[in-house]
Image (cartoon, rainbow, N blue to C red):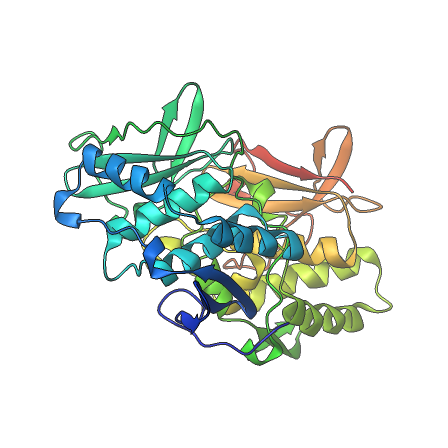
C-alpha cells in the first residue's frame, strides 16, 4: 500500500522506525512511496573502524557479517523487486536505502559501503571492492558499455564503479592505482544492467507543474505538464550509457498523462508528416539550450522527464525526448545520427522529405530537434554537417 513520504538527505525514505517485538525489531521506511519493512535486531549489527581500513579489516568484516542472519533484509529487497518489477538501477537505490537504515552513510562511509557491497552480493550480483589508502571503491559486474565512470577487468569480465561520485569523480588512477580486495566470496553470475524500463509508482502529491510556453508556426501554445523532482534524485548518479538504454526509459505515469494527451489533441487531424514536424518544433523550442559542461560540469544525458525538469538541455537530450514523443504517438522507425560535434535524429515517413538518409534500404527524413540560428525545416541537415561523416548509433524499427 502506498503512503505519503518525506525527503531525507539524497535518498527518498523515512529514517528507520524500530518497533519492539519479542526477540526482533522491525525496520520500516518509505522508498519512493512504497513501504519497506524487515526484521532487524541490533545484535546483527557489524561495526567497522574507518581508521583501520585494510584488506585484513575488510576480510574480518566479511567473516563477521556472514555469521549474522540478514535473510529478512534480502527477502524484503527481493519482495519489492518482484512486486514492482524493479530494474537493477532501482533495485540498487533500494539497497542504498536499506544500508542507510542500518549503517548511515554520514556516520561511517566505509561501513555503509561494505553493507551495500554485502547486500548486492547476497542478491546474486557479482560485486568487487578495490582499496587504496583510505579510499574504498565499490564495483559491480556489468556487460554494458559505460562511458564516464571507471571500470576494472577481471577474468575477462567488466566491473564498473558504483561509488566514484562519492570521491568527487576525479581520482587519478594512474598516479594512485587501486588494488582489488581479496575476498573468498561465492561466485555470482548475475550481471548488473543499467536499463530502466519502469519507474516507481510515485504519489500524485509528489508532482509539481511546469509551464511550457512554445511558439510553433507563429502560434503560441501553453502546456502545463506535471513533473516529479524525485526523478533528479533517482538518476543523479546514473552514468552515460548506450543510447539503447536511454530509449527504454519512460516518463513517469503522471507526467505521461499530463503531456501525451495534450499533444495528441493538438495533432488530431494532422498528417503523420505534419504531426512529426510539430513534435520536432515542440522539442526544439520548448526548452532553452544549455551545454552539459556548463550545467553539470561534465557530460550527462538526460532522460525525457529530466529534460522536462532541468532548465536547459543539449542536442542529445532533445534527441532522446523527441524519440520518446514520436514513439509514443506515431511509433515510426527512427535512426540516431551521431556526428563528431552533434547528434540528431531521422524518422521514416510514408514519403521521404527533403534530402533523406538511406539506412538498410529505407529512406529516413532528418528532424532536427535542437534550436539553431536559423529555422531548419524537416528533411534538412545542418549545412555544416553535409560533408561530415556520421554514425548510426541507434536504430528503432517497431
| Residue occupying the point 25% across, 41% down | 136
State which quadrant residue 176 falls in: top left
Q: Is residue 61 above or below residue 297?
A: above
Q: Is residue 369 visible?
A: no
**Residue ranking furthest to the front:** 22
- Nearest the eye: 291 or 203: 203
Where residue 121 appears, as percent x and y from the top left, is 44, 39
Q: Quadrant of the C terminus?
A: top right
The residue furthest top is 155
From the top left corner, tell me how far across and down residue 377 is, in percent. 66, 55
Q: Residue furthest right?
A: 269
* Residue 365 visible, this angle: yes
* 380 in relation to 268, above or below: above
Q: Quadrant of residue 383?
A: top right
Q: Quadrant of residue 251?
A: bottom right
Q: Residue at x 75, y 43 (%)?
A: 333
Residue 393: x %, y % from top left: 58, 36
Query: Is 205 left, or right, of 397 in this rendering?
Result: left
Classify residue 261 as left or right of residue 94.
right
In terms of depth relative to the viewer, which is nearer, 258 or 363?
258
Seen from the viewer's position, the closer of residues 78 and 133 is: 78
Residue at 39% in and 60% down: 41
* Above or below, comparing residue 193 to residue 98 in the picture: above
Count of residue discs: 0
Along the horizontal axis of the image, is 290 left or right of 32?
Answer: left
Horizontal placement of 8 versus 221: left or right?
Answer: left
Amino acid at each position: 500500500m502506498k503512503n505519503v513520504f518525506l525527503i531525507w538527505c539524497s535518498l527518498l525514505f523515512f529514517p528507520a522506525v524500530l518497533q519492539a517485538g519479542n526477540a526482533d525489531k522491525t525496520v520500516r521506511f518509505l522508498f519512493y512511496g512504497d513501504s519497506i519493512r524487515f526484521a532487524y535486531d541490533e545484535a546483527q549489527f557489524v561495526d567497522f573502524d574507518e581508521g583501520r581500513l585494510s584488506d585484513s579489516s575488510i576480510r574480518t568484516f566479511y567473516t563477521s557479517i556472514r555469521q549474522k542472519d540478514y535473510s529478512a533484509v534480502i527477502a524484503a529487497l527481493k519482495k519489492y523487486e518482484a512486486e514492482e518489477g524493479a530494474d537493477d538501477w532501482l533495485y540498487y537505490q533500494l539497497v542504498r536505502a536499506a544500508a542507510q537504515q542500518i549503517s548511515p552513510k554520514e556516520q561511517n562511509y566505509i561501513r555503509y559501503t561494505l553493507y551495500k557491497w554485502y547486500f548486492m552480493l547476497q542478491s546474486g550480483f557479482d560485486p568487487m571492492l578495490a582499496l587504496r589508502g583510505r579510499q574504498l571503491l565499490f564495483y559491480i559486474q556489468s556487460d554494458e558499455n559505460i562511458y564516464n565512470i571507471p571500470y576494472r577487468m577481471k577474468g575477462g569480465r567488466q566491473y564498473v564503479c558504483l561509488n566514484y561520485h562519492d570521491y568527487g569523480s576525479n581520482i587519478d588512477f594512474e598516479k594512485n592505482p587501486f588494488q582489488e580486495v581479496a575476498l573468498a566470496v561465492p561466485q555470482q553470475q548475475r550481471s548488473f544492467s543499467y536499463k530502466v524500463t519502469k519507474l516507481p509508482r510515485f504519489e500524485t502529491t509528489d508532482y509539481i507543474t511546469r509551464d511550457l510556453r512554445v511558439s510553433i508556426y507563429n502560434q503560441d501554445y501553453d502546456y502545463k505538464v506535471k513533473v516529479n523532482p524525485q526523478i533528479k534524485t533517482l538518476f543523479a548518479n546514473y552514468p552515460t550509457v548506450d543510447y539503447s538504454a536511454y530509449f527504454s526509459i519512460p516518463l513517469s505515469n503522471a507526467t505521461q498523462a499530463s503531456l501525451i494527451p495534450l499533444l495528441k489533441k493538438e495533432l488530431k487531424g494532422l498528417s503523420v508528416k505534419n504531426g512529426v514536424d510539430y513534435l520536432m518544433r515542440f522539442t526544439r523550442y520548448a526548452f532553452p539550450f544549455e551545454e552539459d559542461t556548463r550545467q553539470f560540469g561534465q557530460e550527462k544525458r538526460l532522460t525525457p522527464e529530466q529534460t522536462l525538469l532541468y532548465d536547459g538541455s543539449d542536442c542529445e537530450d532533445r534527441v532522446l525526448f523527441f524519440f520518446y514523443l514520436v514513439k509514443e504517438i506515431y511509433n515510426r522507425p527512427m535512426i540516431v545520427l551521431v556526428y563528431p560535434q552533434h547528434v540528431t535524429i531521422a524518422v521514416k515517413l510514408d514519403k521521404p522529405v527533403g534530402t533523406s538518409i538511406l539506412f538498410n534500404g529505407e529512406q529516413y527524413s532528418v528532424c532536427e530537434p535542437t534550436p539553431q540560428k536559423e529555422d531548419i525545416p524537416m528533411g534538412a541537415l545542418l549545412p555544416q554537417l553535409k560533408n561530415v561523416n556520421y554514425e548510426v548509433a541507434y536504430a528503432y524499427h517497431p
